[in-house]
């Protein structure tokens, strides 16, 4: 039988104690660090400790780039560590010390109530996520809201993701159960959310934007058009690899929702085959670029609203 301990409902009582706010820093993020750290120390809820995984940057370089010394716990990553290993290095330090972890990317910006809202959300759920305002690399507001669909349900995690590593918080025991991470997990945020769902975790999504989400060339997952042929091709391979990882993990230990994930994987494979045709791919991208911006991550792979193009 699948693990069931995650399925217990929360009481709604406030989550007590200090939380762990976790992030990672790496070359290329330096320009964004002053704004990020300023937003962190301006939180309405300051009852947290900051944990930072370093990947190619030293604490001194971070302080120099941000113009101030960070009050943080630093976890240095070994040479050659993958992004998943960098994240795990931090998280395995905190899951036994804190009741919950708040995840934020160091190139984004926290709204003042980000930590407070996460604490409140986790009073009634195992996993918390929030909407985000989208802005560009120069901090210009793009007037786009990244939000969950109006008919949000946990089952959508089989096909798309709205629980990133910048807009979420997890009960620590849930995060611990998802480790160790596959070292080659590129879509680690989706992997952890999906794995939590497969273990019976409860989810809460906050439609109030609690983060400002920066769009730039280094984003792993784009949410704004225009899309390119290369982005669709690379994204499709990443999505298929994601399914391989979560399904292989569920084969090792019984889990829920395997059938839904296998169906989503099958759809992605059909999409891959269909978009091998240049004509189909061009038609698909043209229609994709016309959809409203700010849709969930990876929705642009085998988009259901465009099934008439790729699945006939």
Image: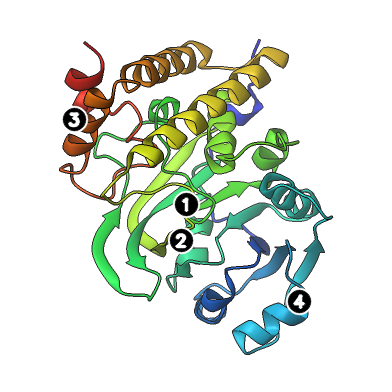
Instruction: Nearest to the eye among marks 4 and 1: give it.
Output: 4
Total marks shown come to 4
For the residues bearing labels 4 and 1, Cβ distance under 8 angstroms: no
SS label for mark 3: helix
Percent across and percent down for residue 177 are: 71, 34
Identify which residue is drawn at 84% across, 55% down: 78
Q: Which mark is residue 59?
A: 4
Q: Counting residues from the N terminus, which is met first, the one under dot 3 or under dot 1?
A: 1
Residue that mark 2 sits on? 117
Considering the numbered disc 1 on the image, is that residue within a helix, a strand or a loop? helix
Q: Which mark is residue 283?
A: 3
Crowdedness near tag 3: few (<14), some (14–19) or many (≥20) residues, C-alpha within 10 Å? some
Tag 1 and tag 2, C-beta contact below 8 Å: yes
Are there few (<14), some (14-19), or many (20+) residues within 10 Å of tag 4? some
Vertical relation: 47 (above or below) 268: below
Q: Which residue is mark 1?
A: 121
Residue 94 sits in quarter:
bottom right
Residue 308 falls in which quadrant of the image? top left
Q: Residues within 10 Å of mark 1 (few under 14, many from 20)?
A: many
Residue 135 percent across, percent down from the top left: 34, 67
**Disc 4 secondary structure class:** helix
Would you say 275 lies left or right of 68 here?
left
Q: Is residue 295 visible?
A: yes
- Marked residue nearer the N-terminal end (4 or 3): 4
Structural distance between the alpha carbons of marks 1 and 2: 6 Å
Of discs 3 and 1, which sits in the foreground? Answer: 3
């Amino acid at each position: 039988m699948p693990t069931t301990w995650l399925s217990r409902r929360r009481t709604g009582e406030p989550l007590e104690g200090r939380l762990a706010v976790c992030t990672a820093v790496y070359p290329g993020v330096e320009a964004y660090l002053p704004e990020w750290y300023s937003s962190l120390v301006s939180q309405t809820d300051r009852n947290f400790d900051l944990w930072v995984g370093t990947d190619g940057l030293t604490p001194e370089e971070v302080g120099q780039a941000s113009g101030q010394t960070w009050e943080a716990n630093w976890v240095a990553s070994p040479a050659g560590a993958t992004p998943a290993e960098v994240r795990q290095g931090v998280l395995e330090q905190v899951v036994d010390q804190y009741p919950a972890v708040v995840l934020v990317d160091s190139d984004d910006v926290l709204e003042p109530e980000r930590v407070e809202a996460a604490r409140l959300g986790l009073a009634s759920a195992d996993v918390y996520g929030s909407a985000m305002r989208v802005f560009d690399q120069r901090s210009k507001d793009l007037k786009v809201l990244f939000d969950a669909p109006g008919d949000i349900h946990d089952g959508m995690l089989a096909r798309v993701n709205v629980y990133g590593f910048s807009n979420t918080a997890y009960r620590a025991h849930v995060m611990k159960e998802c480790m160790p991470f596959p070292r080659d997990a590129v879509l680690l945020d989706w992997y952890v959310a999906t794995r939590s769902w497969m273990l019976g975790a409860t989810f809460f999504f906050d439609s109030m934007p609690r983060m400002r989400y920066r769009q730039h060339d280094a984003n792993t997952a784009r949410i704004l058009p225009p899309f390119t042929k290369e982005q669709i091709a690379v994204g499709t391979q990443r999505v298929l690899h994601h399914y391989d990882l979560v399904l292989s993990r569920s084969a090792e230990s019984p889990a829920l929702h395997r059938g839904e994930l296998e169906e989503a994987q099958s759809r992605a494979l059909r999409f891959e085959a269909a978009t091998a045709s240049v004509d189909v791919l061009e038609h698909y991208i043209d229609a994709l670029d016309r959809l409203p911006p700010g849709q969930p991550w990876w929705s642009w792979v085998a988009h259901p609203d465009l099934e008439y193009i790729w699945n006939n």
